[in-house]
């Protein structure tokens, strides 16, 4: 459900030889695909001087509690685009490209690298949803100019879970992240004409809670500079932390992230708006 820009967003400024996909390629890849392939690609890019922040469904398999809905309560099913953020919510008059997709039984996606971390430890990645709706908002580009990571303004996935499942997911979030408090990834790299094997250390932690909707958590991701395994030399800039806001409203869970220049405070403000948009699609409504 996520376009390639989602996991090449944090490319180092001095890595000049990365080829960005063009608009048509992005649109083609925006459709549903195998998230394991995305996570593997993100891991490879991260060790080539790239800090990845895509959205994947890392985790452990769990069976959420069930609940019943009274016959007098209207039950919403498909998630409509009205439940998503709008360009004006981000201060944009319009978006050049607004990639959207919907799906059935899609896994909740948090972060590709977090998924790779859990997979490397033999932990499962299954948190199925019932329905989902996602979008990526991109700024305008002149005709003929390829899109770049800096064009990503925001990424949003909204999932409908079984009754009780949304509460369980937020309650389990600490356990989901716990195995990846500090994770060392290793792989080949190419950087400024050099090649070799490098390592980078990734860290995830929850830095805020209960700032929007019925439940919410802010997940911070830190990445160290890559280090050549043979020479011990580090390369690339120290990248700033990236953040994902995870919001629950009723039976809906949303994962929200901003582009490379987005800040934690901006994401906090946008999370409140996103929660209000979700109200009209949630069971029960707000």
Image: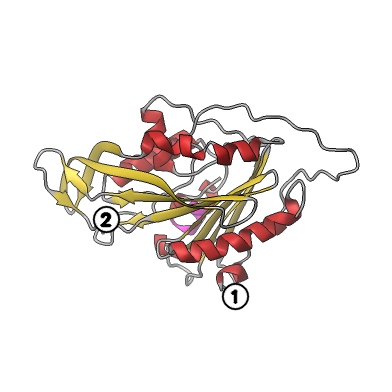
Q: Which residue shows up at 45% across the image and 67% down it?
A: 144
Compare residues 214 and 150 and report the one nearer the observer: 214
Instruction: Give the colouring mode of the picture.
Output: secondary structure
Whether residue 256 appears in magenta in the rendering, the answer is no
The nearer-to-camera label among 1 and 2 is 1
Is-magenta flag for residue 22? yes
The residue that disc 1 covers is 93
| Side (left or right) of 67 relative to 93 | right
Q: Nearer the viewer, residue 281 or 182?
A: 182
Q: Which residues are magenta?
A: 21-26
Marker disc for residue 17? 2
In the image, taking residue 221 as reference, residue 244 lies left or right, namely right
| Disc sitting over residue 179 in the figure | none
Whichever of callouts 1 and 2 sits on the residue coming sooner in the sequence is 2
Q: Is residue 151 above or below residue 256?
A: below
Q: Residue furthest top?
A: 122
User: Is residue 187 visible to the viewer in this orientation of the structure?
Assistant: yes
Quarter occupied by the N terminus: top right
53 above or below 164? below
Q: What residue sits 20% from the left and 51% below the top?
A: 191
């Amino acid at each position: 459900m996520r376009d390639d820009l989602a996991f090449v967003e944090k490319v180092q400024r001095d890595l000049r030889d990365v080829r960005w996909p063009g608009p048509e390629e992005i649109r083609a890849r925006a459709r549903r695909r195998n998230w394991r392939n995305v996570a593997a690609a993100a891991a490879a890019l991260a060790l080539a001087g790239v800090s990845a922040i895509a959205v994947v469904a890392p985790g452990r398999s769990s069976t959420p509690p069930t609940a019943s809905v009274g016959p007098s309560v209207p039950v919403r099913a498909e998630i409509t685009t009205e439940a998503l953020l709008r360009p004006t919510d981000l201060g944009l008059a319009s978006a050049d490209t607004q990639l959207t997709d919907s799906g059935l039984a899609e896994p909740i996606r948090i972060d590709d690298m977090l998924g790779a971390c859990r997979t490397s430890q033999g932990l499962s990645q299954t948190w199925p949803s019932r329905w989902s709706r996602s979008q990526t908002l991109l700024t305008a580009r002149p005709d003929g100019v390829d899109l770049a990571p800096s064009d990503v303004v925001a990424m949003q996935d909204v999932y409908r879970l079984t009754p009780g499942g949304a509460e369980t997911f937020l309650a389990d979030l600490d356990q989901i992240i716990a195995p990846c408090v500090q994770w060392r990834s290793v792989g080949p790299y190419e950087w400024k004409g050099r090649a070799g094997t490098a390592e980078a250390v990734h860290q995830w932690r929850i830095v805020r809670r209960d700032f929007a909707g019925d439940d919410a958590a802010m997940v911070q991701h830190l990445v160290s500079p890559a280090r050549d395994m043979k020479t011990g030399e580090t390369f690339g800039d120290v990248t700033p932390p990236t953040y994902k806001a995870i919001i629950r409203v009723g039976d809906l869970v949303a994962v929200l992230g901003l582009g490379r220049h987005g800040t934690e405070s901006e994401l906090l403000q946008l999370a409140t708006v996103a929660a209000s948009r979700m109200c009209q699609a949630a069971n029960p409504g707000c």
